[in-house]
Image (cartoon, rainbow, N blue to C red):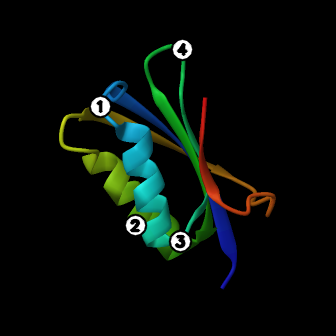
Amino acid sequence: MANVARKFLIRGDVQGVGFRFFAQRAAAQHQVLGYVRNCADGTVEALAEGPAVNVDEFRNDLVTGPQWSRVEHVEEISLEPTGRYSSFRIER
């Protein structure tokens, strides 16, 4: 099964509520690789690589977010998989 790569830009009340840690746990659960980070404009950016069904399930978790978050919108951008990620990490 071919891997896909997608970048997600998550808008809403998503910083200061444990969103990055939530995303890291979701990535482990769905076995996707990549990163998550806070952006200066208040959004959270995540990049996930893996089988399409796994990345889709990861996206579904991002739409829900952790308990204290309020996700207003998730923008999804398809990318070419690079294979450069060996884990899913939180970037600063």
Q: Residue furthest bottom?
A: 1
Going by the numbered disc 3, the residue's amino acid type is Gln
* Marking on residue 40: 4
**Helix, strand, or loop for circle 3?**
loop
Q: Comparing marks 2 and 3, which lies closer to the viewer?
A: 3
Mark nearer the N terminus (1 vs 2): 1
* Residue under the point 26% across and 44% down: 66
| Amino acid type at image mark 1 | Val
Could you tell me which residue is drawn at 54 percent across and 43 percent down? 46
Upstream in the sequence, badge 4 or badge 1?
1
Q: Quick one: quadrant of the N terminus? A: bottom right
* Horizontal and vertical percent position of residue 3: 67, 72
Mark before the other along the chain sequence, 1 or 3: 1
Closer to the camera, 50 or 78?
Answer: 50
Q: Is residue 40 left or right of residue 69?
A: right
Quarter of the picture containing the C terminus is top right
Label ID, residue 88: none
The residue tagged 1 is 17
Q: Which residue is mark 2?
A: 57
**Kind of residue at badge 2:** Glu
Tell which tag, 1 or 2, sits nearer the viewer: 1
Could you tell me if residue 68 is visible in this image?
yes
